[in-house]
Image (tube, coloured by chain):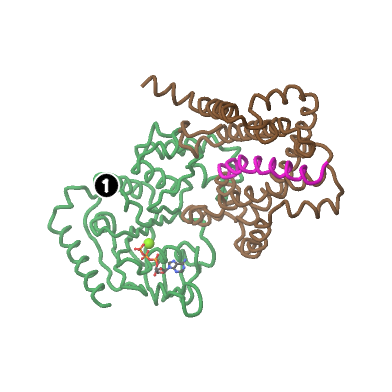
Amino acid sequence: MKDGSTDFIRVECASLYYGGGDDGVLALKDTNLTIARGEFAAVVGPSGCGKSTLLKLVSGLNRASTGKVVVDEADVRKPLKIVGMAFQNPALLPWRTTLENLLLPLQVAEPHRQQFRRERGRYVEQARALLAKVGLAGAEDRFPWQLSGGMLQRASLCRALIHDPQILLLDEPFGALDAFTREELWDILQQLWQDQHFTVLLVTHDLAEAVYLADTVHVFSNRPGRVVHRRAIDLPRPRNSDMRFSTVFVDHVHELRAQIRREREVI
Amino acid sequence: MKWRRALFTASPWITTIGFFLLWEIGCRAFNVATFVLPTPSDAFKALVDNWSGIWPNARHTMFTTLIGFGIAVVFGVVLGVAVGASALLYRSLNPLLVGFNSIPKVAVVPILVLWFGIGTAPAIITAFLVAFFPISVNVAAGIATTEPELEDVLRSLGASKLDILYRVGLPRSLPYFFASLKVAITLAFVGSVISETVAANEGIGYLMLTASSTFRVPLVFASLFVIAAMGILMYAVAAAFERRHTKWATRGLDQYGTG
Ligand SMILES: Nc1ncnc2c1ncn2[C@@H]1O[C@H](COP(=O)(O)OP(=O)(O)OP(=O)(O)O)[C@@H](O)[C@H]1O
Ligand SMILES: [Mg+2]
């Protein structure tokens, strides 16, 4: 999986400048980052250093001011259609049930939108199966405001994956959850990733989360952000909550914490 | 607890009836002259006696209001969608719209009379002019406040601006739209009555004006009652409409519903 011979995602010397003139912000500066196909990558770093911006570059929602992003050997110039995204804010549509929320990407994304009416039955089955997998069986017909925070985040994860994307971009998806729910969701995400073989780029503030889930953790510098440290996490899969208290795990977390502290002191 | 619920249900009736009772008693106790302030019973008597004259005028006002309101809905929604979906349009139209909205519409009626003559047209246009603004503002607000995360999710799926508008912006603005209808219908009604009092030969506003110029004060108040009743009726219809169509926005809560 991590042979690295051909990197699936390559961020090459990318910078991004928001706005123009004097009040602009240089969010990313000469960032380099590579992710292999099927890899689970995590990005950690000080607040405001440009992590969300990196996700926008990789998804093609924003274009780099200088440098470039290459995905699957092609330059990213416009929004990629092979990505799924989930954020801290689950942002489900309150007028749609959970199931209907899951169908939204299929109504919008090619090639599903053409065949949506014809294949609706199949898509509904697919959505139900995915919901069952994350423990949301029975919540299909409930509205978002009838679900708990953890359930909303599960549904949001499902919405990001329903169209079978090759890349999953996650921006602090579990940031607002309590510790127990968060750990439950780690295992669910790990399971989904192992089953479906997509490539993940996870932005998080939680170092334990990064170590628990990722193959590689990239540490960002202060703004303007760039990768200053890269750490391979060679813990066996599937990872389970017992490992979190092993010395290897704890050492990884400590090392990362020290790195970030060093970064913050640079200011 | 049972008592409190009953009180809660009956409270609008109690206050309304109480208000009229106080008025009646006050007028009688202080011997207020009828041509200054008639008692409510005088006014109701005038209402019944003049019903055959009031009814066609009330119907006419209802008609002008609804036509003006209908045009306002169509125009307001189109404008609101355009302004809400395009930051450029919003920026370019904003000063004009705000400026226009701050003009008291009574001041416009003479101009309308100049163009269209005295009659129904100025009333309809006034109703339209006062009613479209809140509709536009609300629809635009609903669309413009689409969560950025949601936009990112959809854009990354290859959605066009039109897709996002159709799937998210429009449904999202519906509760705002329905809420604005309550305000807009009341304003439209006020607009057409004002226009009628200035330049018309039909309508409840016109009736009120003629009654007051001939010092038939109870009839003036009877007309006011009719205006108030019609206003409440239209508000209630709009509110019921709103409740039916936006269950999700009120999270299934009903107790705050009005009307
Ligand atoms: N649309 C925008 N326009 C202008 N500046 C922006 C925009 N988005 C982000 N920025 C700025 O770019 C910098 C990086 O923002 P970004 O959201 O990528 O940080 P982040 O690492 O995700 O922060 P956090 O950890 O707090 O989420 C910040 O200084 C922010 O103010
Ligand atoms: Mg961020």
Decide if residue A8 is on the left or right side of residue B76.
Answer: left
- Residue B12 in the image: state x and y as whole percent: 52, 28
- Whether residue B160 sits left or right of residue A251 in the image: it is right
Q: Does the magenta stretch include residue B190?
A: yes
Disc 1 under 8 Å from ligand 1? The reply is no
Q: Compared with residue A206, is residue A220 higher up or lower down, i.e. above or below?
A: below
Which chain is rendered green in the image? Answer: A
Residue B246 picture location, percent across and down: 54, 37
Q: In which quadrant of the rendered image does the N terminus of chain B lie?
A: top left
Q: Residue furthest top?
A: B2
Q: Which of B211 and B170 is in front in this view?
A: B211
Q: Where is residue B173 in the image (x, y as percent from the top left)?
A: 57, 46
Considering the image in quadrants, where does the C terminus of chain B appear?
A: top right
Judging from the image, what secondary structure is the residue with disc 1 in? loop
Q: Are there few (<14), some (14-19), or many (20+) residues within 10 Å of tag 1?
A: few
Dot 1 amino acid type: Asp
Q: Which of A174 and A136 is in front in this view?
A: A174
Query: Ligand 2 appears in which quadrant?
Result: bottom left
Residue A138 x, y percent position in the rendering: 39, 31
Residue hosting label 1: A178
Q: Eyeballing the image, is A36 above or below A93?
A: below
Q: Give the range drawn in magenta.
A: B174-200
State which quadrant residue B68 falls in: top right
Q: The brown chain is which one?
A: B
Q: Which of B33 and A100 is in front in this view?
A: B33
Which residue of the protein is positioned furthest toward the bottom in this rendering? A22
